[in-house]
Image (cartoon, rainbow, N blue to C red):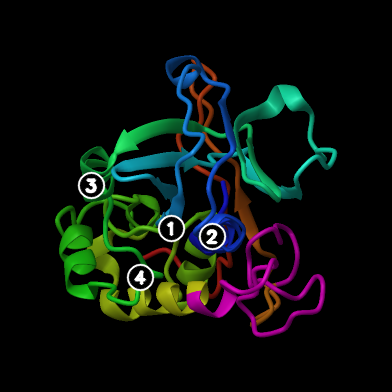
């Protein structure tokens, strides 16, 4: 699933293409909204809230989408051939000059702005919001002190924008074992600030870099490096696969950590 900074870039790309433009055709390829026609309406802006995208259209409408694992938005000149198969398209927004196509989206719905407010209200403070409320994020994280910090950081109801890459990298940077509880972190505010800084530094780039080195193979401390030597101490990076349930679902994402730099307590 894309990190919050990738969703932020998607919103910026869509806003650059659609901001202030009149829709000449729309095509919602999901059953609940298949008959919705927004042609003639103006797109006022496209914004991200954590990992959610909202295109504000007309007087009171919001096109809400979420990429989930496989989704992507692509922008084409009007009439250009798509790079992904048409059967994956979930929504098409067409202006006089461009087409914005959402492929394999996990969520596609048309809401009123009041309904959008209800969606956003379920999210914690957005790490990429200029008005990020750290005190509220900390309050939410500390509301369940016995929860593992790794899970709490991924919970978009606590703070919005962190995905699995940043979760693993933040835990490494602060020497926190993946099974550490929220209450085990001696400086939770610092941990949150590190996560925010990582997203801010990377939001303008396609590749996530947490080490400060943009060369291929050197961009992360532990994520994706199971079995490789730790960049700090040389210990082999450990990897824990997701737990698969009987129904085929996954209870957690893959975890990486250095047993020496992130000891169990």
Task: Mark 2 and mark 1 in contact? Answer it, CB < 8 Å.
Answer: yes
Residue 64, position in %: x, y? 42, 40
Front position among marks 2 and 4: 2
**Circle number at residue 47:** 1
Q: Earlier in the sequence, mark 1 or mark 4?
A: 1
Which mark is in front, 1 or 4?
1
* Location of residue 111 in the rendering, given as x and y in whole percent from the top left corner: 32, 35
Q: Is residue 10 magenta?
A: no
Q: Is residue 215 magenta?
A: yes
Seen from the viewer's position, the closer of residues 205 and 253 is 205
Mark 4 / mark 3, whichever is N-terminal: 3
Task: Kindly identify which numbered label has been placed on residue 117.
Answer: 3
Q: Considering the numbered disc 1 on the image, is that residue within a helix, a strand or a loop?
A: strand
Can residue 3 be seen here? The reply is no
Kindly identify the residue that appears in the image at 35 percent across and 60 percent down. Answer: 180
Disc on res. 129: 4
Q: Position of residue 95 (x, y in %)?
A: 62, 45
Q: Are marks 1 and 4 in contact (CB under 8 Å)?
A: no
Q: Which residue is mark 2?
A: 15
Q: Earlier in the sequence, mark 3 or mark 2?
A: 2
Question: Magenta region: which residues?
Answer: 200-229
Q: Nearer the viewer, mark 3 or mark 2?
A: 2
Judge depth for marks 4 and 3 and give the one in front.
3
State the image coordinates of residue 131 (x, y, percent, origin top left): 27, 75
Q: Quadrant of the C terminus?
A: bottom left
């Amino acid at each position: 699933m894309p990190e919050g900074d990738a969703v932020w870039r998607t919103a910026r790309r869509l806003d650059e293409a659609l901001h202030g433009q009149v829709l000449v055709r729309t095509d919602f390829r999901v059953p609940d909204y298949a008959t919705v026609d927004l042609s003639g309406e103006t797109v006022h802006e496209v914004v991200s809230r954590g990992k959610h995208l909202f295109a504000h259209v007309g007087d009171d409408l919001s096109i809400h989408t979420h990429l989930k694992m496989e989704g992507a938005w692509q922008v084409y000149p009007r009439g250009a051939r798509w790079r992904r198969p048409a059967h994956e398209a979930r929504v098409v927004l067409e202006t006089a000059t461009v087409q914005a196509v959402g492929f394999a989206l996990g969520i596609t719905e048309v809401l009123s702005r009041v309904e959008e407010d209800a969606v956003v209200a379920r999210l914690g403070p957005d790490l990429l919001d200029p008005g990020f409320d750290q005190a509220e994020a900390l309050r939410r994280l500390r509301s369940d002190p016995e929860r593992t910090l790794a899970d709490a950081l991924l919970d978009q109801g606590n703070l919005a924008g962190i995905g699995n890459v940043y979760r693993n990298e933040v835990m490494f940077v602060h020497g926190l074992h993946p099974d550490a509880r929220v209450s085990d972190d001696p400086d939770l505010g610092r941990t949150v600030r590190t996560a925010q800084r990582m997203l801010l530094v990377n939001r303008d780039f396609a590749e996530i870099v947490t080490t400060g080195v943009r060369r291929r193979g050197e961009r992360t401390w532990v994520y994706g490096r199971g079995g490789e030597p730790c960049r700090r101490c040389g210990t082999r990076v450990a990897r824990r696969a997701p737990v698969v349930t009987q129904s085929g679902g996954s209870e957690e994402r893959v975890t990486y950590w250095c047993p020496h730099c992130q000891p169990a307590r």
